Image: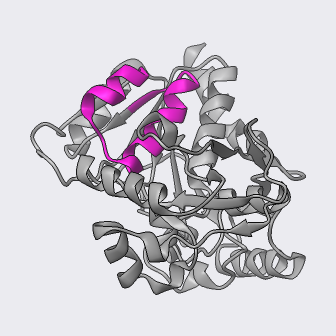
Amino acid sequence: MAVCATRTGAGKSQTSRRVGRLLIEAGHRVALVRHPMPDCDLEAMRVQRFATLADIDAADPTIEEREEYKEPVRQGMVMYAGVDYEAVLRRAEDEADVVVRDGGNNDFPFFVPDLLITVTDPLRPGDELTYHPGEVNLRMADVVVNKVNSAPLSAVAEVVETVTRTNPAALVVKAASPVTLEPGPALVGRRVLVVEDGPTLTHGGIRLGAGTVAARLAGARELMDPRPYAVRSIADAFARNPQIGPLLPAMGYGKAQIDELAATIAATPCDVVVTGTPIALRRILQADVPIRHATYELRDAGRPTLADALEPLLDGLAASRR
């Protein structure tokens, strides 16, 4: 099966993880497959398999890749990536009952899926028909998951109406992605630097993420602007993407850029750093101030649920085993 989205940052990764957990709970072996960022040795990236955090560390991936690989592995799934999609698929099939293709930022699936879930985003209503390949993903979808906890009801209704008009055969599953802030020093009255997922800020069009939501809910006095303190490639990212505003994108395409991200954090005056990135940045960089990590997982928000959507697939697996 495959999980895609209409825009970067729509909530596809937590949807993939939720699908994986539901399949594991049903007794199936699961492999998640995601395309890599092919900016290194392509031959070395032909087929990549990650079953432990040590496997991920050994591959020395970018921050974006780490963000996608780490959490599924921590939850007991095997993660595959690579540039030879045929070889990746065959390897994954050898050890899994279900292969879940996670469509990168918002790719369409490179495997022919038996079930295609497309995640829409009511924080950006209308984008589901005006971006490629997001519109393709919407029109091909068997199931559409809609994050509803942080968007106005009118925007949710607009996206649902667009989905039912464009793809009336799709099952609409309404879901939420509530934010949880890990324990740490209080944010009330403090100056907070928020670090958000890089691609979501730079080309996803989102102007607030999990870190921003968590910091505001926890009572941060001021969100500090990192732009005057950005160095080298981080400053270049701000120059190319003025829409980002006073948030720090988690750029990390190689050690040099991770060092520049760390230098930007160190130079920005703040009391606490809040990260809304899928990976906890303290695993890969050091800071002189506390870092609190905001996480988010998919939850059902009514019926039908995501488990309901998977029933035909699970019934078919059960029948094949009998």
- Left or right of residue 113, residue 303 in this image: right
- Left or right of residue 200, residue 253 in this image: left
Where is 318 relative to 180, above or below?
A: above
Does the stretch in magenta take in 53? Answer: yes
- Left or right of residue 319, residue 58 in this image: left
Q: Nearer the viewer, residue 267 or 82?
A: 267
x and y percent of residue 219 in the render?
A: 85, 59
Tell me if I can see residue 145 in this picture.
no
Does the stretch in magenta take in 42? Answer: no
Q: Nearer the viewer, residue 68 or 100?
A: 68
Residue at 66% across, 79% down: 124
Prevailing SS of the magenta stretch:
helix
Tell me if I can see residue 280 in this picture.
yes
Where is 30 relative to 227, above or below?
A: above
Q: For residue 251, which quarter of the picture?
A: bottom left
In the orientation shown, which residue stands out farthest toward the top? 322
x and y percent of residue 158 in the render?
A: 79, 82
Q: For residue 209, which quarter of the picture?
A: bottom right
Where is 70 relative to 220, above or below?
A: above
Where is 64 relative to 6, above or below?
A: above
Q: For residue 295, which quarter of the picture?
A: top right
Q: Nearer the viewer, residue 248 or 266?
A: 266
x and y percent of residue 223 in the render?
A: 68, 68
Residue at 49% across, 27% down: 73
x and y percent of residue 120 in the render?
A: 65, 67
Report the magenta residues as a range. 51-79
Q: Nearer the viewer, residue 291 or 91?
A: 291
Q: Quadrant of the C terminus?
A: top right
Report the number of numbered marks. 0
